[in-house]
Image (tube, rainbow, N blue to C red):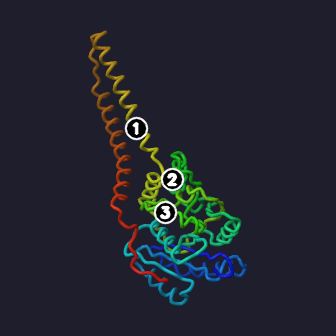
């Protein structure tokens, strides 16, 4: 660390970002230069790009950028696509090994306001170990994405995982937080909740979301659903408790129906009929049981993946 100034690393996960990665790096280098000129960070601060198995020329561009500026541009290439969260984890592990005082993660499309990085540094210098970027609004989101995202945060908080609404993966974490992350061997880390749950001193910085410069978002419905399920199963057993309660209520309901049927037969000599009612109840409770099995299956699948102890990702190349 030069002259005891903060050494900052910026992580950029990339997947098929050939249209924007060069301009993104140039923009972030300007941001670094501006903050360095103000004496807030060290001159050896750098950018670390993680290519998440891109099929286009993203990695070739990263290699070219590294060859032009090897001290400030680092990179890691996955052997295949592992997903955005794994790319972020790889970036955090990579910069921890290379060395830094704190790290900021930001999307390759720079929809998140890169000028907020300086505000992150200001909060870090005040003693905050984690600084969360919170978007001011969701004007750039589609109607579906906007309301499903808001619902997700409400559900997560209901289940005990206290995650601020509208928090993305735009955040600053200190070396102390990185060292604590290294103590967690689990494969399915949900970073949006993980750092907030560490209990370290945390600040919030609000920012505006810009339109994407080029290309299109790599998040689709299935990837967002997978992220949501991973977050819920990683941070809460509340759904399992709901399943247990539903099972108990179904048993009580069945017992009461049985008592009512026996009483009608004994006291009124009346055998209840109602084929349609029986079919409706069978379909309802059958569907409920299948739903409950699905919830349990998600947790069993999570345990299965952890038990296999496979690596989170396999790197193909690294530029240091």
Instruction: Give the side of residue 116 with respect to residue 219, left or right.
Output: right
Measure the alpha-carbon separation of dots 3 and 1: 32 Å
Q: Nearer the viewer, residue 71 or 27?
A: 71
Instruction: Give the side of residue 193 with respect to residue 270, left or right.
Output: right
Q: Nearer the viewer, residue 156 or 41?
A: 41
Q: Nearer the viewer, mark 2 or mark 3?
A: 3
Q: Nearer the viewer, mark 1 or mark 2?
A: 1
Q: Are marks 1 and 2 in contact (CB under 8 Å)?
A: no
In the image, residue 6 above or below residue 253: below
Q: Measured from the top left, where is residue 169 in percent x and y? A: 55, 64
Instruction: Give the side of residue 197 with respect to residue 220, left or right.
Output: right
Measure the alpha-carbon separation of dots 1 and 2: 26 Å
Q: Sequence-wise, which precedes: disc 2 or disc 3?
A: 2
**Which residue appears farthest toward the right when viewing the image?**
38
Q: Measured from the top left, where is residue 243 in percent x and y? A: 40, 40
Residue that mark 1 sits on:
244
Q: Sequence-wise, which precedes: disc 1 or disc 2?
A: 2
> Which residue is depicted at the point 53% across and 63% down?
180
Q: Measured from the top left, where is residue 229 in percent x and y? A: 43, 54
Residue that mark 3 sits on:
183
Q: Sequence-wise, which precedes: disc 3 or disc 1?
A: 3
Residue that mark 2 sits on:
148
> Which residue is depicted at the point 28% across and 21% down?
273
Q: Secondary structure at mark 1?
A: helix
Residue 163 occupies which quadrant of the picture?
Answer: bottom right
């Amino acid at each position: 660390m030069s002259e005891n100034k903060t050494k900052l690393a910026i992580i950029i996960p990339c997947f098929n970002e050939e249209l924007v990665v060069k301009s993104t790096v140039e923009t972030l280098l300007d941001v670094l230069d501006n903050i360095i000129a103000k004496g807030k960070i060290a001159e050896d601060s750098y950018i670390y790009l993680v290519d998440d198995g891109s099929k286009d020329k993203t990695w070739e561009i990263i290699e070219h950028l590294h060859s032009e500026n090897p001290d400030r541009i680092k990179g890691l290439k996955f052997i295949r696509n592992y997903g955005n969260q794994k790319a972020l984890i790889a970036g955090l592990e990579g910069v921890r090994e290379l060395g830094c005082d704190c790290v900021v993660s930001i999307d390759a499309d720079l929809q998140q306001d890169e000028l907020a990085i300086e505000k992150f540094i200001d909060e870090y210098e005040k003693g905050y170990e984690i600084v969360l970027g919170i978007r001011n609004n969701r004007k750039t989101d589609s109607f579906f994405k906007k309301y499903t995202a808001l619902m997700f945060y409400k559900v997560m908080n209901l289940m005990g995982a206290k995650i601020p609404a509208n928090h993305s993966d735009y955040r600053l974490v200190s070396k102390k937080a990185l060292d604590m992350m290294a103590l967690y061997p689990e494969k399915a880390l949900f970073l949006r909740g993980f750092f907030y749950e560490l209990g370290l001193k945390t600040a919030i910085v609000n920012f505006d979301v810009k339109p994407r410069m080029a290309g299109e978002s790599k998040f689709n419905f299935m990837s967002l659903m997978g992220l949501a399920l991973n977050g819920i199963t990683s941070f809460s057993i509340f759904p399992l408790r709901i399943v247990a309660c539903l099972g108990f209520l179904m048993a009580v309901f069945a017992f009461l129906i049985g008592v009512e049927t026996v009483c009608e037969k004994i006291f009124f000599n009346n055998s209840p009929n109602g084929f349609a009612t029986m079919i409706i109840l069978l379909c309802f409770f059958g569907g409920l049981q299948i739903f409950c099995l699905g919830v349990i299956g998600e947790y069993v699948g999570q345990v299965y993946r952890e038990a296999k102890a496979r690596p989170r990702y396999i790197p193909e190349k690294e530029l240091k």
